Image (tube, rainbow, N blue to C red):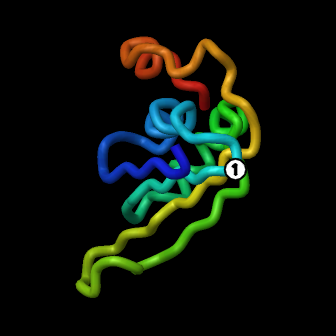
């Protein structure tokens, strides 16, 4: 796909493994996250790179004009995802890439 989006489903590292394999090279993965977004990015960066992602950018408060804090994490798919990904949820949860 040219773009894949997710919203409040799981930690960014888990989302990346589910979503990045679906994105074509040059496409984008968008994740809607809350206040702890930077911690999630920091924990997941190695796994994101393993999956072919990179060039992460963050946009704040684009969608809601209320007191809820949210960001959109934008991740470009720069390279090919290895064939073994995504793994099943049990494997991802037990041994995340980060």
In x, y percent, where is residue 13? 51, 37
Q: Quadrant of residue 82?
A: top right
Note whether 35 is above or below 46 in the view shown.
below
Q: Residue at x 48, y 56 (%)?
A: 30
In x, y percent, where is residue 27? 62, 50
Residue farthest to the bottom? 65
Label 1: which secondary element? loop
Q: Residue at x 51, y 51 (%)?
A: 3
In x, y percent, where is residue 46? 70, 36
Question: Left or right: 52 with respect to 34?
Answer: right
> Counting other residues with Cα less than 10 Å from the Cα at mark 1, is it few (<14), some (14-19), or many (20 or more)?
some
* Location of mark 1 (residue): 26
Q: Nearer the viewer, residue 36 or 72?
A: 72
In x, y percent, where is residue 26? 69, 50
Residue farthest to the front? 1
Note whether 4 is above or below 66 in the view shown.
above
Q: Nearer the viewer, residue 18 or 22?
A: 22
Q: Quadrant of residue 9?
A: top left
Question: Left or right: 55 with respect to 8?
Answer: right
Label count reads: 1
Question: Left or right: 22 with respect to 61?
Answer: right
Note whether 11 is above or below 50 in the view shown.
below
Quadrant of the snapshot with the C terminus: top right
Question: Left or right: 54 with respect to 31?
Answer: right
Q: Residue at x 58, y 50 (%)?
A: 41
Note whether 91 is above or below 64 in the view shown.
above
Q: Residue at x 66, y 58 (%)?
A: 56
């Amino acid at each position: 796909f040219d773009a894949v989006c997710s919203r409040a489903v799981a930690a960014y590292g888990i989302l990346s493994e589910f979503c990045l394999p679906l994105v074509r090279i040059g496409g984008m993965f968008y994740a809607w996250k809350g206040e702890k977004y930077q911690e999630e990015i920091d924990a997941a960066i190695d796994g994101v790179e393993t999956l072919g992602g990179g060039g992460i950018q963050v946009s704040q408060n684009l969608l809601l004009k209320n007191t809820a804090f949210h960001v959109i994490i934008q991740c470009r798919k720069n390279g090919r995802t290895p064939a073994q990904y995504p793994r099943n949820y049990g494997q991802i949860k037990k041994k995340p890439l980060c």
